Amino acid sequence: MPKATARHILVENEEECLKLKKQIEEGADFGIIAQEHSKCPSGRSGGELGEFSQGQMVPEFDKVVFSGDLNKVLGPVKTQFGYHLIEVTDRSE
């Protein structure tokens, strides 16, 4: 079963998500932005989700993690929790 290692930032709206994505693309540190802005408890650890298997996350999140480019800021991805920026750091079959 495919596995991935990723980190994410969860915010309430798309506008904030896009603003944070722009800051990261302009050189801001993903982990620090996660600590300062993410609504997810993982924000305290820089958004780190650790390793997880395909199917463990909500479908919209899963799809991006297992099809998107590695080491790129992906999103905004809308789920029932809000809007995510996702960075996949590793993936294995």
Image (cartoon, rainbow, N blue to C red):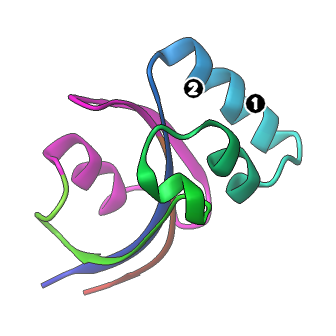
Quadrant location of the N terminus?
Answer: bottom left
Query: In the image, which residues are magenta?
Result: 58-84
Viewer-nearest of labels 2 and 1?
2
Q: Position of residue 76 (x, y in %)?
A: 47, 30
What amino acid does circle 1 point to?
A: Lys
Residue 31, quarter of picture = bottom right
Residue 68, quarter of picture = bottom left
Q: Quick one: 85 or 10, which is closer to the camera? A: 10
Q: Position of residue 23 (x, y in %)?
A: 80, 34
| Residue pictured at 14% horizontal, 65% vertical | 56
What amino acid does circle 2 point to?
A: Cys
Q: Position of residue 81 (x, y in %)?
A: 28, 32
Give SS at disc 1: helix
Label 2–label 1 contact, CB within 8 A: no
**Image height check: is 15 above or below 63?**
above
Mark number, residue 17: 2
User: What residue is pinned by disc 1?
Assistant: 22
Left or right: residue 45 versus residue 60 is: right
| Residue pictured at 78% horizontal, 42% vertical | 25
| Residue pictured at 57% horizontal, 26% vertical | 17
